[in-house]
């Protein structure tokens, strides 16, 4: 896989170059650049498949480079930065991973392996993976609303309910948020964080279950008072998960 490093710090470029050569033999380093403008020139000339992109750079940030390509981006990106405050803004972009400096070797190898596998993913799948990776790092999720993004901590989400191609997200201490993504999209992001799909239309936070109601149709009562039907095929697994909390 042809690889390019874009970073304004010569030392950072040298360190990452050495790490890639030693621990990621599947990469073929084709060049480095010290600015966004130089990076665009190198991308056009060298056609890399993977770009390691610093975010905090003078004059133009790494985000400006991705804005330049927008829907024309035909290469994978791994953000590299010493500043964790950029993680939320990174949700706006289609990237494979977000590595903080000093770069951990295991995290680097994992990110590179994902980059190789992502060559066969479509844009929607890559967007979902990006959300999973960044959510793991900052413990928040970006909810796609009609007019932008709403960032919330996982523990604030009580439940999610399908509304056709949209999703209503119910929050602790706040009004429901209507999201322009399907429930399936958020299932992929939230299941690893203690959520469970109890029904085709409902995804719940297991920590927000007040009680399980027995009957012909099993129900869970959430902390907001809403009672939600549990699919018969999901009932046994749900009870097992609740008993292990």
Image (cartoon, rainbow, N blue to C red):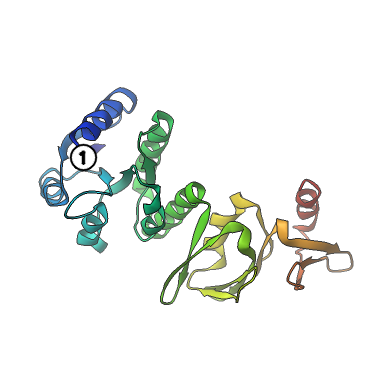
- Counting every numbered tag in the picture gives 1
* 68 over 46 or under it: above or below: below
Q: Position of residue 2 (x, y in %)?
A: 22, 38
Q: Tell me what residue is drawn at x 26 percent, y 37 percent.
A: 1
Q: Tell me what residue is drawn at x 75 percent, y 67 percent.
A: 223
Task: Locate residue 57 relative to residue 209 in the image: left or right.
Answer: left
Toward which corner of the image does residue 53 lie, by quadrant? Answer: top left
Hey, which residue is sitting farthest right in the picture?
Answer: 215
Hey, which residue is sitting farthest top in the picture?
Answer: 22
Q: Is residue 72 visible?
A: no
Classify 10 Å Cα crowding around label 1: few (below 14), some (14-19), many (20 and above).
Answer: many
Q: Is residue 26 visible?
A: yes
Which secondary structure, mark 1?
strand
Residue nearest the observer in this picture, 42 or 224:
224
Residue nearest the observer in this picture, 148 or 182:
148
Q: Position of residue 173 (x, y in %)?
A: 64, 71
Q: Tell me what residue is drawn at x 43 percent, y 77 percent.
A: 146
Q: Position of residue 65 (x, y in %)?
A: 21, 55
Q: Tell me what residue is drawn at x 80 percent, y 63 percent.
A: 210
Task: Locate residue 44 relative to residue 154 in the image: left or right.
Answer: left
Task: Locate residue 41 relative to residue 124 in the image: left or right.
Answer: left
Residue nearest the observer in this picture, 139 or 211:
139
Q: Position of residue 79 (x, y in %)?
A: 32, 46
Toward which corner of the image does residue 26 lie, by quadrant? Answer: top left
Residue under circle 1? 4
* 198 over 41 or under it: above or below: below
């Amino acid at each position: 896989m042809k690889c390019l490093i874009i970073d304004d710090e010569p030392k950072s470029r040298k360190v990452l170059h050495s790490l890639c050569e030693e621990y990621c033999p599947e990469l073929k380093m084709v060049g480095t650049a010290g600015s966004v403008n130089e990076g665009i020139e190198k991308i056009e000339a060298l056609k890399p498949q993977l770009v390691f992109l610093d975010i905090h750079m003078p004059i133009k940030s790494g985000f400006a480079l991705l804005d330049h390509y927008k829907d024309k981006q035909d290469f994978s990106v791994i953000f590299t930065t010493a500043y964790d405050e950029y993680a939320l803004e990174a949700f706006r972009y289609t990237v494979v991973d977000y590595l903080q400096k000093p770069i951990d070797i295991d995290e680097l190898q994992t990110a590179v392996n994902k980059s190789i596998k992502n060559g066969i993913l479509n844009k929607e799948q890559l967007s979902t993976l990006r959300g999973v990776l960044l959510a793991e790092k900052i413990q928040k999720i970006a909810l796609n609303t009609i007019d932008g993004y709403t960032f919330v901590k996982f523990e604030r989400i009580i439940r999610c309910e399908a509304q056709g191609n949209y999703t209503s997200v119910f929050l602790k201490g706040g009004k429901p948020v209507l999201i322009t993504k399907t429930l399936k999209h958020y299932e992929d992001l939230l299941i690893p964080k203690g959520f469970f799909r109890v029904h085709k239309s409902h995804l719940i936070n297991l920590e927000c279950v007040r009680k399980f109601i027995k009957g012909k149709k099993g129900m869970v009562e959430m902390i907001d008072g809403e009672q939600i039907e549990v699919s018969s095929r999901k009932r046994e697994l749900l009870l097992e998960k609740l008993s292990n909390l």
